[in-house]
Image: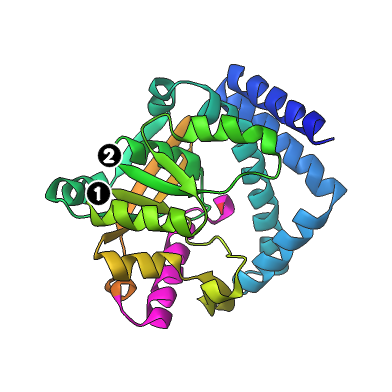
């Protein structure tokens, strides 16, 4: 069954890759709208989360944001063939603008490591590829549920020079070594860790949420510069935004640092909430 699912995903990726990007996104949105009508777990979770996080919106506005969110997920799926399967030289042409890149470049040039906090906003795969062009980049990698897709994903993510390391203690040690030596480390700050000892409950969008401590520990132990990164979906491609983190994220107080981390993620998602 997994082999069949893997083959279907590969077929969809290759189909998306040969279609114009705009058409691939349209098809993704169409599939998401159909899924919305059918209902299901993802729709229910999206609606529940939006009701909790956007309490200032009325029920009609919340429903619209939920639909837009699922459509954005459809666009993400539709465009992945372009991002994973086509050459970097082509993907680079989809980056329509880059804001704040100098923060990363100046730190790397001075020998200071950089921790990039890239939440699941927009298309974080594009951001990861761009980071690989700015300096020695190392990120954690956790194999997908469909193991047959792992070689494809690893090759795609590493083709601009980034290195993927396993999401275990040895991998975290590799992150620390790289950032201490002046390299770049990419972390998904909103990824929920499996180990209850690897996070704390701190506010996010006004709701207590279990938040991983990995990024805060890397920052405290490395003295690296901290930058939030987002690849926002725009017409014809993506707009990349790099933004310096609040000073509180450098705090030795874990709780204070985690609150600042979540506040930074919240600030980014308010730029394009439907893409989160």
Q: Residue at x 37, y 33 (%)?
A: 96
Is 229 located above or below residue 255 in the figure?
above
**Looking at the image, do the residues carrying marks 2 and 1 touch, with CB atoms under 8 Å apart?**
yes
* CA–CA distance in space, label 2 to label 1: 8 Å
Report the disc number at residue 134. 2
Residue 267 within the magenta-colored segment of the rendering: yes
- Residue on which disc 1 sits: 104
Q: Considering depth in this image, is 212 or 259 the residue closer to the camera?
A: 212
Q: Considering depth in this image, is 148 or 39 the residue closer to the camera?
A: 148
Q: Residue at x 80, y 44 (%)?
A: 35
Q: Does residue 196 appear to the left or right of 250 in the view shown?
A: right
Using the rendered view, name the quadrant where residue 205 is placed: bottom right
Using the rendered view, name the quadrant where residue 46 is placed: bottom right
Instruction: Say which element carries label 1.
Output: helix
Find residue 198 and report its horizontal and vertical position in percent: 53, 72
Our reading of the magenta stretch's main secondary structure is helix
Residue 56 appears anywhere in the view: no
Q: Residue at x 30, y 55 (%)?
A: 177
Magenta extent: 251-275
Is 258 located above or below residue 76 in the figure?
below
Find residue 222 and report its horizontal and vertical position in percent: 27, 64
Q: Does residue 160 appear to the left or right of 125 in the view shown?
A: left
């Amino acid at each position: 069954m997994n082999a069949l699912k893997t083959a279907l995903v590969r077929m969809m990726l290759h189909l998306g890759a040969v279609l114009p990007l705009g058409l691939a996104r349209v098809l993704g949105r169409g599939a998401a709208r159909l899924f919305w009508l059918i209902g299901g777990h993802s729709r229910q979770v999206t609606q529940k989360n939006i009701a909790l996080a956007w309490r200032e919106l009325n029920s009609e506005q919340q429903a619209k944001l939920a639909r837009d969110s699922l459509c954005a997920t459809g666009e993400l799926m539709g465009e992945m063939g372009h991002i994973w399967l086509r050459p970097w030289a082509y993907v680079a042409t989809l980056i329509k603008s880059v804001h704040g890149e100098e923060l990363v470049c100046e730190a790397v040039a001075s020998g200071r490591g950089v921790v990039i906090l890239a939440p699941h906003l927009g298309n974080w795969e594009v951001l990861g590829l761009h980071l690989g062009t700015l300096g020695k980049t190392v990120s954690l990698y956790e194999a997908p549920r469909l193991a047959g897709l792992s070689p494809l994903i690893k090759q795609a993510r590493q083709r601009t020079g980034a290195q993927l390391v396993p999401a275990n203690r040895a991998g975290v040690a590799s992150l620390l070594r790289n950032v201490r030596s002046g390299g770049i480390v990419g972390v998904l700050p909103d990824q929920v860790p499996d180990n209850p000892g690897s996070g704390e409950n701190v506010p996010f969008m006004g709701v207590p949420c279990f938040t991983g401590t990995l990024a805060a520990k890397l920052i405290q132990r490395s003295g690296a510069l901290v930058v939030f990164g987002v690849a926002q979906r725009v017409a014809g491609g993506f707009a990349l935004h790099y933004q310096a983190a609040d000073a509180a994220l450098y705090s030795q107080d874990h709780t204070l640092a985690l609150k600042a981390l979540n506040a930074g993620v919240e600030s980014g998602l308010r730029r394009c909430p439907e893409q989160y």
